[in-house]
Image (spheres, rainbow, N blue to C red):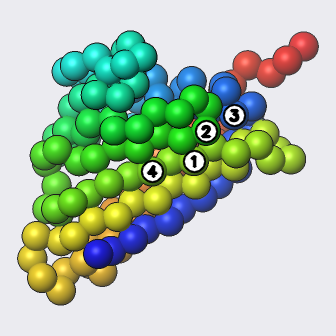
Amino acid sequence: MQEIRIQGEVPASPQAVWDVYTDHRSWEDWAGFREVVLRQQGEPAPNGVGATRVMRARGMAIEEEVIAFDPPKRMVYRLVAGAPVRNHQGEVLFTPSEIGTHVEWIVRFDPWIPFTGALVARLLRPALQDVLDRLAAYPFERPA
C-alpha cells in the first residue's frame, strides 16, 4: 500500500476551513476543478457520510464517497471510480494552529499495476498539494 501525506497551514479557524473544504460544490470555485456534481447527499445533508461526488478536471473524472464526517476535525472518503488505483482512501484532518488551522491530508492506495505505486504517488502528490495550496489561499472572511 502506498501512502502520501501532505500538510499545510490555512489562515482561518478550523470551522471555516472545514466548511469550505467539505462544501463539495464550492470546489469549482477554488480547488481547480472544472465541474463537481454532488450525486447523492449524505448525512448530515448534504456533504456528510454517504455523500458521493463526481469531480472533473484535466480530462479525467473521479467519483468519491464520504465514509466518515466528524466536524470540524476529520473527513474520510474513498475513491469509487476514475483513477488507476484500488483501495484508495483519503483522510483529511483539521487541527487548530497558531496561524489558524493545520490541515493534514493522508491518502492510501494500491496501484492497479504492480510496482507502479511510487510513480502514481509521484503524479498524485502535486495535484493534492495544489488543492491544499488553493485552500490556504482561499479568501476566508476575517473577523472585524
Residue appearing at x 22%, y 70% in the figure: 110
Kindly identify the residue that appears in the image at 21 percent across and 60 percent down.
87
Query: Residue visible at 25% across and 77% down?
Result: 117
Helix, strand, or loop for circle 3? helix
- Label 4 amino acid? Glu
Mark yes or no: residue 7 visible. Answer: yes
Q: Which mark is residue 91?
A: 4
Place residue 120 in its image quadrant: bottom left
Label 1 CA crowd tier, 10 Å (few <14, some 14–19, many 20+): many
Amino acid of disc 2 = Lys
- 101, above or below 130, in the image: above
Judge from the rendering whether residue 80 lies leftward or rightward of residue 17; answer left or right: left
Give the CA distance from mark 4 to mark 2. 11 Å
Please, what secondary structure does the residue beneath circle 4 have?
strand
- Residue 136 relative to residue 35: left or right: right
Q: Quadrant of the N terminus?
A: bottom left
Kindly identify which residue carries mark 3: 14
Is 17 placed left or right of 50 in the picture? right
Question: Alpha-carbon distance for marks 3 and 1?
Answer: 10 Å
Q: Are marks 4 and 1 in contact (CB under 8 Å)?
A: yes
Name of the residue lying farthest toward the bottom: 115
Dot 2 and dot 1 residues touching (CB under 8 Å): yes
Marking on residue 73: 2
In the current view of this chain or complex, which residue is farthest to the left? 113
Q: Position of residue 62 (x, y in %)?
A: 19, 42
Pick whichever of labels 3 and 1 is earlier in the sequence: 3
Q: Secondary structure at mark 1?
A: strand
CA–CA distance between discs 2 and 1?
A: 6 Å
